[in-house]
Image: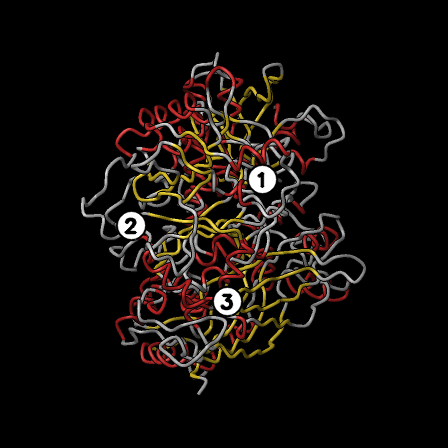
Amino acid sequence: MQCFRRQPKLSKSQENLLLEESRKVAALNGKRLGLQDDKDLKFLLKGCHLLKIKSNSWRRERFYKLQEDCKTIWQESKKMLRSPESQLFSIEDIQDVRAGHKTEGMEKYARDVPEYRCFSIIFKDQRKNLDLIAGSEVDCNHWVAGLGKVIDKSNSMSQRQKLKHWIHACLRKADKNKDNKMSFKELKNFLKEVNIQVDDSYARQIFVKCDTSKTDTLEDDEIEEFYKILTERKEIDRIFSKHSDGEETMSLDNLARFLREEQHEEDTGPELALALIEKYEPNETVKSEKAMTKDGFQMYLMSPDGNIFNRAHTQVYQDMTQPLSHYYISSSHNTYLMEDQLTGPSSTEAYIRALTKGCRCVELDCWDGPNSEPIIYHGYTFTSKILFCDVIKAIKNYAFKTSPFPVIISLENHCSLEQQKTMAHHMHTIFEDMLLVAPIDSKMSSLPSPEQLKGKILVKGKKHSPETEEVSDEDEAAEMEDETVKSEVEKKRMSEKLKLAKELSDTVVYCKSVHFQGFNDTNPQACDHMSSFSEGKVLKLAQESGNDFIHHNISHLSRVYPAGWRTDSSNYNPVDMWNVGCQIVSLNFQTKGTEMDIHQGRFQENGFSGYVLKPEFLRDKKSKFNPKSITEGPWWTRKKLRVKVISGQQLPKVNKSKNSIVDPRVILEIHGVQRDNEKKQTSIIDNNGFNPTWEEAFEFEIDVPMLAMVRFMVEDFDVSTKNDFIGQFSAPFTSLKQGYRHIHLVTRSGDQYPSATLFVHISILDAY
């Protein structure tokens, strides 16, 4: 049994018992996933040898198998000092499984192997891809299909199912001798595993209460009883008791009243209450009586219907027929970079990750490369280089996986005429019909809409004027505020004219890059003219001419990029730019932090489509709105936001040391116009990341709710070192639901934790 080769030597009878127990556990978890008879799952549980590939000279045979919990994959390691935990990775960490040569590693190092034997595992965080070669097409298909099924089934589990699945996995992990029983010592280890520290007397009290057989171990039903005690939600019990009038079940009328008065649901009749009973009530007898038990009530509160984020906003719900300039557009800066912009690696994977995160504007920094093939990298730095044609292929393959709305390619062109022609040739031959090559409407009186441009790729770049084939290099690299990375020769070249190939010029239709001439330009810009601004320039214009900037952005696209001094690829806060109507506010997607959290929060609205309609007062030509000088108007709809932070659930360990327990606190932030920006925080809960309780209330006054973003951040407090980030959730103020709501926390990389949540109560009132 290769999957157990590093475990202590067992007798034959012990090995048979262990094998039988493993089969039972695997069958149970397969049943929970609805895959108990699935051939692909059975193959994964058995495991097989695969070739792991890292370079042309590094290929190693390793054994891989899905563990019996159906949640983790065990990988053989030749490193003798690695802990058993380091040989595991979770299904929940997997972003994607790609068959064939669909990563840079496969493209470079596995060209000699047929695609039908190759597949790659892509992780959600910034871990390197796992490129693997199967022994046969059949084995490869088992892995790709099997992992896909397990991931899909895990994602479709209810929050309660995920919690139970996770706790049982932790129980098995704590069961060191694999006898399917839990001693008191194992119980204490389990409590640490799930991130809760209790004193021995309390742990012993729980243990004795559950040990009804008096065997000094817990097994079967006793473990189930322990699970129930552990997952008890007393705060939800109190809410249920109050709104059910103390009865064992909540009547249809009481549930409808709760939804209307507490949850402020729009459709608050008995139809909604009945639909929720049908959806979440597990007791068939109670369901037939049109009532809801406490279990059903808890399942509702933990479901998408009980989420703080308006479920209607998870779909495309906005008008998508207005001009492009009327939308915020999810945009990436230096998209090719995986790390910083001085020495970091460039990768096509960075484009794939940005596009699958909903990004609709990507940047290509193009330079002459060897063998007459243009390359992409951050010029005059030590970042690595990738082929232009490989990037175009990646964009084609992933442009519309997440959103059907148009993708804008922002070209920063430093290439010779010949290589510019090559760029144009690659875009035409690879993109084919995806590439927009002619206006939708010959009149060109206004920009087309996202709806009109569905499935199309637009090029933003320089374009010939009727008078000349030369253009000034006024793109980002020429306007950088910090010139330290450019030589005197390069500065001189920037001041000269650049010859532009007609073939490349012709790919630019609606996004013609021009130098900004000011708001009082006597020769108004055409609607297809767009300008790029450094963050410093935008902040200056917003301060001095905020209303003029808003009017400019009603009919023209504006692109904003980080200041040149941000060589560490840090980000600015995009809210200030959105407040004056800038659409293409570009951030370094590879750099995690508050700014990217706010960006992701903004674009989770409208179905994660990458396009969000600006508020009406940023689209009205008569608007007098100025974010730096708030006066009365349609934007002035002052609200009071009252937030009660009640409790947390299954907050993950961030300090991986064995005995560390999280000391969580919650920070609440408002990001909007300057007078709305505010931050408040809860107290610190010592030694409890499993089910901390705060019951603390906060109030914020918000003058311009339509521009406000709300961020909940949870951190692990440490008196001696910097506090560790645990998770966060950001959303537009206008997407928040009222009442008792769960907040599903996301990681630094923007991926949702499987079971980490906050439980809050939200009230929104007029502030007059």
Q: Under tag 3, what secondary structure?
A: helix
Residue contact at pointers 1 and 2, CB within 8 angstroms: no
Residue at which label 3 appears: 544
Q: CA distance from mark 3 to mark 1?
A: 40 Å
Determine whether 67 is above or below 426 in the image. Answer: below
- Label 1, residues with CA under 10 Å away: few <14, some 14-19, many ≥20: few
Residue contact at pointers 3 and 1, CB within 8 angstroms: no
Q: Amino acid at mark 1?
A: Gln
Determine whether 227 is above or below 737 in the image. Answer: above
Residue 710 appears left or right of 511: right
Quadrant for the N terminus in the image: top right
- Say whether disc 1 or disc 2 marks the residue closer to the N-terminus: 1
Determine whether 310 is above or below 634 in the image. Answer: above
What mark, if any, has residue 395 been given in the picture? none
Residue at which label 1 appears: 126
Q: CA distance from mark 1 to mark 2?
A: 31 Å
Q: Which callout, 1 or 2, points to the residue nearer the camera?
A: 2
Q: Under tag 1, what secondary structure?
A: loop
Q: Which callout, 3 or 1, points to the residue nearer the camera?
A: 3
- Residue displayed at 54% across by 40% down: 477
- Say whether disc 3 or disc 2 marks the residue closer to the N-terminus: 2
Determine whether 137 is above or below 751 in the image. Answer: above
Q: Amino acid at mark 2?
A: Pro
Residue 719 appears left or right of 534: right
Residue 634 in percent (x, y) is at: 35, 77
Q: Nearer the viewer, residue 101 or 652?
A: 101
Residue at which label 2 appears: 450
The answer to which quarter of the image holds residue 486 is top right
Q: Which callout, 3 or 2, points to the residue nearer the camera?
A: 3
Residue 229 in percent (x, y) is at: 59, 64
Residue 438 in percent (x, y) is at: 24, 37
